[in-house]
Structure formats: C-alpha cells, structure tokens
C-alpha cells in the first residue's frame, strides 16, 4: 500500500519549470525563485502559469472535460475501429495501456499544478510589500483555490467517495514546495483540507472586482460597456475574472465539495450566495438558438462562474475528437433522444437542438456533437459570441446543488430550483416529484443533459453511488472497481523502467 507521494515525482515537478517557460511540461532548468518573485508581475506570471498548465490537453483542455470522465460516464458511442483508443476505457478496462498513460498523465499534471501553486503560497507573504491595490489577496486567494480545486479532482478520480469510504486512504494533500514526500491522507482528511483552502480563498477574495455592482457580465464583443464591463478595467490582470477562480467560483467550489461530503446546510449556503447575488444571468434563448453561428452561445458563456480559456479548443475538439459522423466521438440518435427525453418533457429542449447535429451514417442516423464548434477567425471579424472556454463551474450546477441540498427540508423550494433550470433550457413542464430517490434521479438526468461534454456526470454517479446509465438502456451497477481509478504504478511514479 502506498503511503506517500514519492520524492522522485516531486523533484520532477519542481525542476520542470523555468522563468521563461513557466510550467513547461519538459524539464528545462531549475527555476530561479529569487528572480521570479522579486516583482508583482513575477507572481502574476506564476499564477497565470498554473491556469495555463490546467488548460493543457492532458488536463482540462481535453482529458478532464470531454475525455476520460465522459467516456466512463458512457456519454459516447465509440466506433468499432476506435481511432482514439478509448473503447477499453468505456469498458472499464483499467489495465489498458492507453488508459494507463492518460490516467497517469492526469495524476502527474494535477500535482504539477499543485506544486507550483504551493510555490506561490510559500513566497507571497514575505513579499507582500510588492503588491498594489488588492492584488496580494487576489493572487494568494486564487493560489489556495487552485490547490484545492486540483486536489479535489484527484480525490474524485483516484479515491473512494465520501459516501462509501470516508476513512479510506485517498491521495497525498501536498501543501509545500519541497523535495520531501507527502503521506497519503484519508478521504475525510483530503476533503477537510480542500474545504480549509477554499474557505481561506473565500476570505481573501472578499474584495474581488467581480463582486462590485459595476462589474457586469456580458459577451466580449459587446461594445456597450453597460452590457459588459468585464474587459474595461485598465489593469489587464483584473479583466475577465470568470477566466479564473474568482470569489463566486470559490463559493461554487465550496458548494460542490460540501455536497460531496453530504453537508447540505453548507452546500446550500454557498450556492445561495451565488443565486442571491443575481450576478449571473441565464442564457437568452435568442443567443442559444441564433441562426448565424457567429451569434450563437452554445456553452452558455454568461452562466460560467469559472472556465478554462483554451484558444485551441475549436481545433483540438472539432478537427478530430468530434469529427464528422461516426469517425469521432458521437451518439447514436436514439440514445441522444433518450437522454434528452425528446418523446416526453424534452420535446422543446434547446440543448438537444443546439448541441447535436443529426447526420446520416449510411443505414442510420447519428448525433454529431457540435457544442464546442465555432466559426474560425478567418470567417469574419466576429468569430463567435464568446471566448473559447471549457466550462468548469456553471450557474446550472449551482441550482442543482441548491435543489438537492434543500429537498429534505423544503421540497417545494427544491423543485423550484430544478424547474428554473429546466425552464431556461426550454422545458416548461414543472416537476411534481415528491420522493427523494426519484428527485435524485431527476437531478442526475439534468446533470447529464446540461453538463454534456464537461466531465461532471461520472463524479455525480460516484458521489451518489448510483448505477451508471449506459447506452441502449443498459445499467452499470455502482462499484468501486469502476469508480476508483488505480493509482499510478510504482515504476511510473519513480520513473523506473522494467528491464
């Protein structure tokens, strides 16, 4: 049984950064910390570097968004010739070499980001005099939030759920930039550490510019500053706060973590901070279903509390991952119609009509995923209504957390939270469910519908220890042999090769 994060992986992460190429994947030179952290701009560069690392394809730029968790949640029909080598993953064959490689890269990549967040935290207090305005609190708060966010996803992938095994050994919670190994902690200890970091971040971000009434959320190509003030701050570092872990994103992360722990009171408390702020508007139907592609908002940009900015997202996903017909990840049309309940309440669901394109596969029809498709920059001045973003936390998830957290004490209010989401997606039929088990089933349906291609459904099945709804009506019974990804092999952790 592994008891610590080995020294080798920490050394590899520590030595694979340079001032010129912050968080570059390949080792270059040992970072000169004394040079990097002599200015406020150095701290900014370090912080933005952690976000850049998170946006790479082995993490949230693909694998943790449309990749492994979505495949495990049975959200794709994978062609028989399997060009991207994910069929074994969909069948939970965790010894498959392609799965092992992706899984190990996720582990190493997330710890890479964590260790570098720690580097910021270990240097910032002694350099507080360098910072202007509230930048000290913003940078320190975001570093805590990033450390917590990445640890939590490691926990959700590589450890049993809190519901099933709260005292089980989980992962190392690394809090220092050091060449010393870190002991593996229990599920409960990791969750408590995540909460502790997020609560610290929440306090530090209490003066986040996004909280101001003058900060109005909108689309980047809106010229009316009354409709969008996100890009008007003269300090570039303070623009587009939703591209980073801002105050509201931290509150949403706390709601997500408290729900995972089963603390409904604190989950609801943090969800209501966002809901009551009325800061984030639901996506207008006219934007969602606009005829011209350049005017569409497929990812519900205004609803993003936090997202990963990925300039290459369109090419990375649509050139090959969601490529034409059955050659890429897709759904058989009958499965898509089942997921979105087209024959009953979902007949007017805009997510079905806007995120999937029906194409002929010869003898049948399939649903091609177009959720992340947009015009190229060469198509005109306005390439799209919004930036290229991979959603991380959305308004809809906050409402679903509020709905689940309030059902035991106020089922009427819980149904209202769920109905508000459904109404804003085109479903007008109200929820009439009165039992908790049936209500949770509806929650899972909406997570699958609203977070399609965002990597959150698998975690919901695991948290609730619910059967995975497979394609063609199949059910995969809950089991930790599916829900808990194997830790990296010793040979991979230590970098040794078998002879």
Image: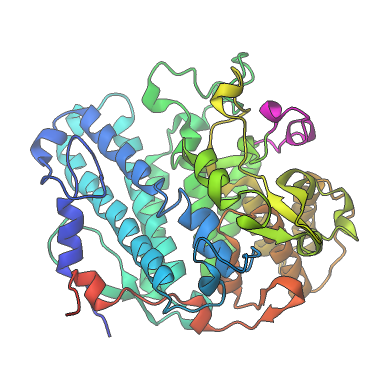
Residue 7 sits in which quadrant? bottom left
Q: In terms of depth relative to the viewer, which is nearer, 191 or 473?
A: 473
Q: In terms of depth relative to the viewer, which is nearer, 227 or 471?
A: 471
Residue 154 percent location from the top left of the image: 40, 65
Q: Is residue 282 magenta?
A: yes
Residue 246 percent location from the top left of the image: 45, 39
Q: Residue at x 51, y 59 (%)?
A: 67
Vertical relation: 42 (above or below) 494: above
Q: Is residue 240 shown left or right of residue 176?
A: right
The C terminus: image quadrant: bottom left
Q: Residue at x 30, y 40 (%)?
A: 49
Q: Residue at x 62, y 16 (%)?
A: 226
The N terminus: image quadrant: bottom left
Return the residue found at the far front.
362
Vertical relation: 326 (above or below) 389: below
Q: Is residue 50 shown left or right of residue 395?
A: left
Instruction: Say if residue 317 shows up in the picture.
Output: yes
Residue 491 percent location from the top left of the image: 22, 76
Magenta segment, which residues?
Answer: 280-296
Q: Residue at x 61, y 49 (%)?
A: 323
């Amino acid at each position: 049984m592994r008891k610590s994060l080995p020294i080798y992986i920490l050394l590899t992460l520590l030595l694979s950064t340079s001032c010129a190429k912050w968080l570059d994947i390949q080792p270059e030179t040992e970072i000169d910390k004394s040079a990097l952290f002599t200015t406020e701009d150095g701290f900014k560069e370090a912080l933005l570097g952690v976000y850049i690392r998170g946006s790479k394809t082995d993490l949230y730029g693909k694998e943790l968004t449309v990749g492994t968790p979505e495949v495990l949640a049975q959200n794709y029909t994978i062609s028989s010739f399997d060009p991207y080598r994910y069929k074994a993953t969909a069948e939970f064959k965790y010894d498959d070499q392609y799965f092992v490689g992706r899984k190990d890269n996720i582990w190493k990549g997330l710890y890479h980001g964590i260790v570098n967040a720690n580097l910021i935290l270990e240097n910032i207090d002694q350099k507080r005099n360098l910072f202007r305005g509230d930048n000290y609190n913003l940078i320190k708060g975001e570093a805590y939030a990033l450390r917590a966010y990445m640890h939590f996803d490691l926990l959700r992938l590589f450890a049993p759920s809190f519901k099933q095994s709260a005292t089980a050994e989980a992962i190392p919670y690394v809090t220092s930039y050091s060449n010393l190994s870190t002991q593996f902690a229990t599920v409960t200890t990791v969750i408590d550490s995540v909460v502790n970091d997020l609560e610290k971040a929440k306090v530090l971000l209490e003066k986040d510019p996004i909280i101001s009434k003058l900060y109005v959320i909108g689309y980047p190509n809106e010229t009316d500053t009354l409709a969008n003030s996100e890009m008007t701050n003269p300090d570039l570092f303070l623009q587009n706060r939703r591209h980073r872990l801002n105050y509201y994103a931290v509150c949403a992360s706390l709601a997500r973590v408290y729900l995972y722990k089963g603390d409904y009171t604190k989950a609801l408390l943090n969800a209501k901070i966002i809901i009551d702020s009325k800061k984030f508007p639901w996506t207008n139907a006219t934007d969602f279903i606009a005829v011209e592609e350049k005017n569409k908002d497929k990812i519900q940009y205004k609803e993003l509390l936090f997202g990963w900015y990925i300039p290459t997202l369109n090419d990375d996903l649509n050139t090959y991952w969601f490529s034409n017909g059955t050659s890429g990840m897709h759904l058989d049309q009958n499965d898509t119609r089942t997921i979105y309940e087209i024959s009953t309440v979902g007949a007017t669901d805009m997510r079905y009509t806007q995120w999937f394109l029906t194409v002929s596969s010869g003898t049948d029809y399939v649903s091609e995923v177009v959720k992340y498709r947009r015009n190229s920059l060469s198509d005109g001045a306005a390439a799209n209504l919004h930036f290229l973003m991979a959603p991380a936390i959305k308004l809809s998830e906050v409402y679903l957390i509020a709905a689940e957290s309030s059902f035991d004490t106020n089922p009427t209010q819980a149904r209202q939270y769920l109905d508000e989401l459904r109404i804003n997606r085109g479903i007008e039929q109200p929820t009439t469910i009165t039992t908790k088990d049936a209500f949770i089933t509806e929650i899972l349906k909406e997570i699958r519908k609203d977070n399609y291609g965002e990597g959150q459904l698998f975690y919901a099945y695991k948290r609730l220890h619910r059967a995975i709804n497979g394609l063609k009506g199949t059910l995969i019974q809950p089991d930790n042999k599916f829900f808990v990804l194997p830790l990296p092999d010793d040979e991979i952790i230590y970098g040794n090769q078998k002879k």
